[in-house]
Image (cartoon, helix red, strand yellow):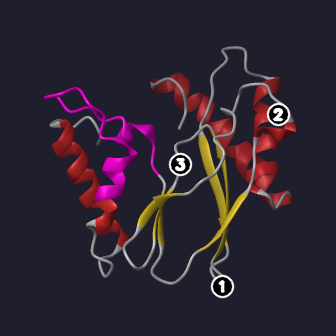
Amino acid sequence: DVSGKGMPAALFMGPARALLEEGMQTLRSPAEILTRLNDAICRNNPKFMFVTVLFGIHDTTTGRTVLSRGGHPPAVLRKRDGTVSEIDAPTGRLIGIEGGADCFADVEITLQPGDAILLYTDGLSEAMSPEDSKQFGVKGLMRCMEGLSPTSPLDAWAASISRTVKSYAASDQLD
């Protein structure tokens, strides 16, 4: 998720994405990849733009998942039994803001068959209710996930969450 809007944001995201992909070729730790990405962006960032990232590596054979956050909202885990919780990972630094190598940390979880992780941008959690000006929040997202059918496909989950947030905000601002 890049700061700003329009063409400047798009032009900033392109190189950030390319640098992320380059780091994936040589490094195996999400925290190391985010550290390298941050260092590279900080070297040439005269407008002080930033990106938030939640980056992970998932092994489909073992279920081992390693996550690292660069200022991005936390991931939400829904276990196959229907319980939902935030994945406790340090926030990390916004990508594009100077900092040391200790800014990012890896968190490892093991996903079991039927478990799912929700990655989202702050546009979902910060959607506002026009009636009381309250944010939908991470708790709202977690309630959405609790109500999802474990047998539904993931695209149906995404559509259901999107409809719920749009209804809460009573607008199409989240398209």
Query: Is 123 positioned to the left or the right of 68 in the image?
Result: left
Q: CA distance from mark 2 to mark 1?
A: 32 Å
Q: CA distance from mark 2 to mark 3?
A: 22 Å
Q: Earlier in the sequence, mark 2 or mark 3?
A: 2
Q: CA distance from mark 1 to mark 3?
A: 24 Å
Q: Nearer the viewer, mark 2 or mark 3?
A: 3
* Residue marked by disc 2: 39
* Residue marked by disc 3: 74
Q: Amino acid at mark 3?
A: Pro
Q: Which residue range is magenta in the image?
A: 120-143
The image shows residue 117, relative to residue 129, as above or below, that is below
Q: Give the numbered dot on residue 61.
A: 1
At numbered mark 1, what does the secondary structure look like: helix, strand or loop? loop
Q: Amino acid at mark 1?
A: Thr
The crowd level at tag 1 (other Cα within 10 Å; few <14, some 14-19, many 20+) is few
At numbered mark 2, what does the secondary structure look like: helix, strand or loop? helix
Q: Nearer the viewer, mark 1 or mark 3?
A: 3
The x and y percentages for residue 154 are 37, 70
